[in-house]
Amino acid sequence: MKIKRRYHHYLKCEEYMTNMWKQVPVEQREELIAKSLALLTDIEKFTKAMMYVIDSWIYSSEANLTANINHQAWLGQAACAIEHNAPEDLTKLAWAMMTKEQQEAANIAADNVKTIWVNRYAGNS
């Protein structure tokens, strides 16, 4: 199903209110990487966090999940940002620490959440 691209000003996007695209103090980095790794590898908690993203970040989800980007990555980064205020660069570092099997499981979870969002979005369009 082809979904029409939607744009929203960044100030309207909920992710802007988190650290998702910001720098954090050096002394917080290791803790946030560890929290991101723990979330990304706990599929139940990870799925709940991604569901919270699509349920509460209406504009960010619409802007990003209709864009030609890696939706799995965005959902993972958004989940870490909404769950424990981790910026996307630290989520990427946590991702690199995961095994291939853990990455595959996280991607499947992200695909499942994206499918839920697409079905809801298509039904409301």
Image (cartoon, rainbow, N blue to C red):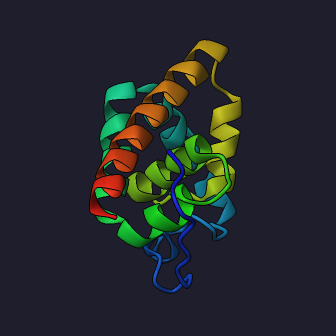
**Is 69 in front, or is 32?**
69
Quadrant of the rendered image containing residue 33: top right
Picture coordinates of residue 75 (x, y %)? 50, 48
The answer to whether residue 3 of the structure is visible from this angle is yes
**Is 124 in front, or is 79?**
124
Picture coordinates of residue 73 (x, y %)? 61, 44
Residue 99 horizontal side relative to residue 79, left or right: right
Residue 13 in the image: above or below residue 41? below
The extreme top residue here reads 101
Picture coordinates of residue 88 (x, y %)? 63, 55
Going 55% across and 85% down the picture, which residue do you hit? Answer: 9
Going 40% across and 48% down the picture, which residue do you hit? Answer: 118
Residue 39 horizontal side relative to residue 70, left or right: left
Residue 19 in the image: above or below residue 10? above
Going 40% across and 32% down the picture, which residue do you hit? Answer: 112
The extreme front residue here reads 1
Residue 42 horizontal side relative to residue 55, left or right: right
Residue 115 in the image: above or below residue 10? above
Which quarter of the rendered picture does the C terminus lie within? bottom left
Picture coordinates of residue 98 (x, y %)? 63, 24
**Is 45 in front, or is 74?**
74
The answer to whether residue 30 of the structure is visible from this angle is no
Going 37% across and 55% down the picture, which residue do you hit? Answer: 53
**Is 85 in front, or is 114?**
114
Quadrant of the rendered image containing residue 58: bottom left
